[in-house]
Image: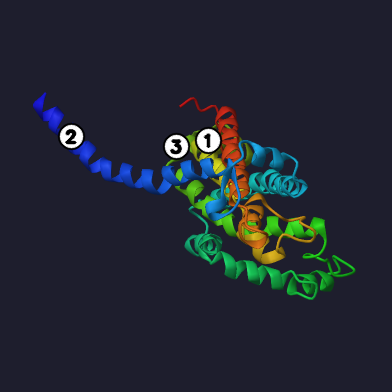
Amino acid sequence: MGLKLNRSIIGWFFASLSILLISMFYFYPMLQALILSFKSGMGANLEFTGLDNYVRLFNDPVAMIALRNTFIYLIFQVPFMILLAMFFSVLLNNPNLKFRGFFRTAIFLPSVISLVAYSVIFKYLFSTEGIVNDFLLKLSIISEPIEWLMDPFWAKVLIIIAITWRWTGYNMIFYLAGLQNVDKSIYEAAKIDGANSIQQFFYITIPMLKPIILFTAITSTIGTLQLFDEPMNITGGGPGNETLTISQYIYNISFEYTPDFGYAAAVSFIIVILTVVFSIIQFKIGGEKD
């Protein structure tokens, strides 16, 4: 009993530093932000206004546009990126494929490139007179340049393309790690039973990767709800707020417009609530009970 008590004390001693730092730099700022969301004003003139900021939020047309845009990115980009990452992982897990290391590195590389740098590059590539339009015109796929940065629809498509290009390789690494832990004898048995590659993918690969799919779905959802760099640097939230996201709107409220940190804190907690809701939904769909 004495030995167990000593181990318990030592364990709590080592854990206490981490608990203290997490509380100071994570939970305490969250609590302060929550308190701030019930106040209005600036600096020493902050006054408690109750739920006024939240009422204002649901009557704010710009906030609703930002929320709509964020949902569009979430609904279209996250499933497509996950499927693409799974496709590449299955393809690059083939032991007979030559230069597997090169292809893995090439697909993963975008995820380590500077967010600002690649956003600026995309902005120039997809400009009206950019390389992408020139390429499409030469192939006669389009008859006139696409206004990627000025058209509301194509601007959203551009943001989705940019996010997918950057994060597909990052998620692919998780699926590759999961596939390499799947017993090869399962696939061999399936081949003997006459299962083709498509059947093996849907009845073996996907079920075996279920925990990783759930993980990547949740992390990708959180990342998309916090999307900021791409719309900020590629389109600036335009045209006409058609690519504006919730995170970018929080930045605008805090620094671009007349600063209103109380209202910005209230809007930020919408992201927290949405993150919790979507995570619960994904756990339910994924069948995870713990």
Q: Earlier in the sequence, mark 2 or mark 1?
A: 2
Q: Name the residue at the right extreme.
A: 143
Q: CA distance from mark 3 to mark 2?
A: 46 Å
Question: Is 188 on the left or on the right of 41, as rendered?
Answer: left
The amino acid type found where label 2 is placed reads Ile
Name the residue located 74 percent from the left edge and 74 percent from the top edge: 131
Residue type marked 1? Lys
- Corner quadrant of residue 158: bottom right
Indicate the position of residue 287 as horizontal and vertical percent values.
54, 27
Q: Which residue is mark 1?
A: 210
Can residue 94 be seen in the rendering of this structure? no
Residue 58 in sight in this render? yes
The quadrant of the image that shows the N terminus is top left
Residue that label 3 marks:
185
Name which residue lies at 79% across and 61% down: 239
3 or 1: mark nearer the eye:
1
